[in-house]
Image (cartoon, helix red, strand yellow):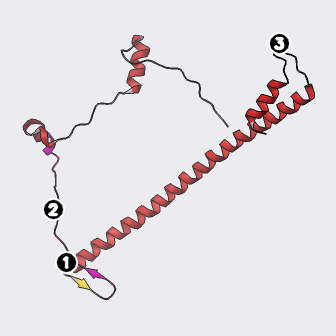
Amino acid sequence: MKIYDIDAAILSLIDEETGEISDFEAFAELQMQRETKIENMALWYKELIAEGKAIREEERALGERRRACENKAERLKSYLGELLNGEKFKTAKTAISYRKSTAIEIEPEFVGWAKENAPELLTFKEPEPNKTAIKAAIADAGGVNYAATVERVNISIK
């Protein structure tokens, strides 16, 4: 029986006009079933949270392993580049060649210079509300335009 079916059955046992229970044994049995369903849903919730945490930890461990492999591969690639020093290498199983590319290297002083002389070379982020400062301002001043403290009720399952 689903939880909403149990709730409906409980309501059907209660007389709407007098509030009396027509079958107390059935009412008690439905209450126990309802409590069992709620307990099982809460336990399922806890199981899902634990499984999500385990998956997150496994992702973290796999991410560390991935980064270690990528770093080792980059070091090996760099070492090969030093060994070959621009010389091509080719066998039946592998081939190493080189291609030219361009990249922009920016010195730390560039930003200061660009602010004064060429601001179009910079990108600026949009301002974001600082919720911590807004909360403090609301507490100190009693209010801030277009911002308010809202009280919420959050369920906690442990």
The question of residue 65 being in magenta is answered with no
Left or right placement of residue 85 versus residue 47 in this view: left
Q: Residue at x 22, y 78 (%)?
A: 97
**Which residue carries the number 2 mark?**
102
Q: Are marks 2 and 1 in contact (CB under 8 Å)?
A: no
Instruction: Tell me which segment is drawn in magenta.
Output: 91-113
- Who is closer to the viewer here, 20 or 45? 20
Q: Are marks 3 and 2 in contact (CB under 8 Å)?
A: no
Which amino acid lies under the numbered mark 1 shown in the image of this protein? Asn
Residue 39: horizontal and vertical position, in percent?
Answer: 75, 38
**Which residue carries the number 1 mark?**
85
Residue 37: horizontal and vertical position, in percent?
Answer: 76, 38
Q: Residue at x 29, y 30 (%)?
A: 127
Q: CA distance from mark 3 to mark 1?
A: 94 Å
The quarter of the picture where the N terminus appears is: top right
Secondary structure, magenta segment, majority class: loop
Which amino acid lies under the numbered mark 2 shown in the image of this protein? Thr
Q: Secondary structure at mark 2?
A: loop
